Image (cartoon, rainbow, N blue to C red):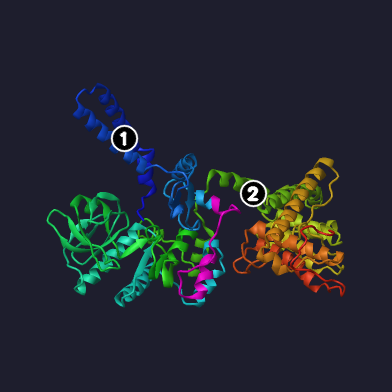
Amino acid sequence: MDCENTAKWLHETVGPGAQYRADAHHRLTKSARRARAASAKRNIAARLHDINTAAEKWAMRPNQLVIVDEASLAGTLSLAALAHQAETAGAKLLLVGDHGQLSAVDAGGALRMLARDPNTVTLNTVWRFSNEWEREASLNLRRGRIDTLDTYTEHGRTHEGSHADMLDAAYQAWLNDTTAGHTSLLIAADNATVNTLNHRARQDLIATGHVEPDGVPLRGDTLAGVGDRIVTRENNRRLSDGNEWVHNGDLFTVIARHQDGALTVQRDPDPDGNARVVTLPGDYVAAHVNLAYATTAYRAQGSTVDTAHTVATTGLSRETLYVAMTRGRHANHVYAAIDQPGDDPDDSRHLIQPSTGREVLDGILRRSDADQSATESIIAAQQSAQSMATLIPIYEHIAHQHSTLRWQPILRTHVQDETTVEAIRGSDAWPKITGLLRSLNLTGIDAEAAFADALERGFDNDGDADPGAVIAGRVARTLNNSDTPPQPVRYLAGMIVPAEPADDPAVQAAIDSAAHAIHTRAESLVHEALATQQPWITTIGPQPTSPDRNSTWWAAAQAAATYRDRWGVIADTPLGGTTRLDRDQRRDRQRAQRAIDNLTAQPTSPSETPEPTTVSTTPITR
């Protein structure tokens, strides 16, 4: 069927096209009132009829189905205008697209917002890939699942090396595929790299005799001659091959060039074998034509080829990588560059410090630059304020301030030198010291005695070491090496060391309020996971019916939910992977895992008969 892009539709309905017709209709209507000759009236009536016919062409009708394809690339304001027109006309607007792909150049995010609405219909079957494993892997890329990179590596799809080596490897792989007769895309992060790869491809084609050496200048400081593959970068309805006009993104092969810089180009043959020809004027060629051997992911979106080869650099987003790694039916390869030229490629000081290719890809998947609608931005801000990533630091800050008030007098009692006192209090290790002392008390060890002993030993043998770090190390050893059997610590939400009771009612109220917020959040996360049957909650197992095991199950679920919410874990397993965790996240993971292990270790009651398909979303006991 005939299609139009949203820009043209809005141009003709609410933009300059509509205004032009309205002005012409107004002028002709005035002229009709003044006209006396019958021929003039007939001429005006005919022109008015043409205007009305054109207006009807660009108007939605009742019960009409209006489909917007690749809707993630449509700006929110454009979609809002179309939605208003459809509602007014009684038509239905259907948006089709992948919200995980690249967003509109204009303000976007509408499709992403709608995709999260539970009433939105989602297509779940992936058809493009010939390899079964790649279907699920592609969806995990869209979700930002870091562990899916292991799958791509196992199948030989990830490569790493220097920026120059990766450009060369990707180019050679693309050239081999193209030479073998496959359709293939060579994808790079930026226009400068695309131009470099296009220039290299052209030189190789010249050497093999497929392309003439001379050519006319294109945008991007490149040339195009007979035999070159080019892509047009701007819609132009005045340029037609007799069947369709020239679109942004159309691919052609150059069959002739002209002295004025124009190019005669040919489309690829259609299913009937027709290869239509059009001549692109010199000014259009110079401003809106590129070589088509390499491309950016943005331009590649919507393409389907046999293979794709992508050069990945730090700074790319998850959406860019997802688009680039889902173009090929049979193979999609990524070449991670571990060193990348900065502003001055001849100055080694501007090189990004090398890392591993996996770290480059990890960073890309963790970085999303998808547009958010205003509604989503508000929701995200509200969720951020309620998340464990916000609530736990607030609680720990209150607990630390309370501990500081308690332990500071003891510090001054046992350390006479004020400079040393301030050095300990100002040390980065001071929060760790107060946390360790809290843990000592909670496990039944005399924290005050342990603190006093650590301070009394002085610092003469520790040289220039941070006195706070020295004290923290001593207190930690007391905690780890104590002969006193420790009492089990009941962590708040499975992983937070509870604050010590405060004598000041206001301080205690603040502690209780923060603890309540964390407990409420943990419960709501578990309820949500149960209601939607999220994979991680089903991995923990069905909620038991016996009170004792249900209490342990609930503690494990809360600990897992708290850990996931605090550290942004999106894996299907309760706690995700263990690689590349910093010290604090590793500590929290160990505590959450301990809560899950407690459930596993607890014997199942013989009389217990859990029903996995009828899971209660209310804890029997806490």
Image coords of residue 312 (percent x, y): 43, 65
Indicate yes or no whether the magenta region holds residue 26.
no
**For marks 1 and 2 on the same chain, the one whose residue lies earlier in the sequence:** 1
Q: In the image shown, does 2 or 332 lie closer to the viewer?
A: 2
Residue 369 in view: yes
Q: Give the magenta range.
A: 113-140
Number of numbered discs: 2
Sort mark 1 into few (<14), some (14-19) or many (20+) by Cα contacts within 10 Å. Answer: some
Q: Mark 1 sits on what residue?
A: 21
Q: Is residue 245 above or below residue 21?
A: below
Q: From the viewer's perspective, is residue 602 above or below residue 92?
A: below
| Lateral position of residue 415 relative to residue 153, left or right | right
Disc assigned to residue 538: none
Q: Which residue is mark 2?
A: 383
Circle 1/circle 2 CB separation < 8 Å: no
Which picture quadrant has residue 163? Answer: bottom left
Quadrant in which the N terminus appears: bottom left
Quick one: quadrant of the C terminus? bottom right
Mark 1 to mark 2 CA distance (whole Å)? 48 Å
Q: Amino acid type of disc 1? A: Arg
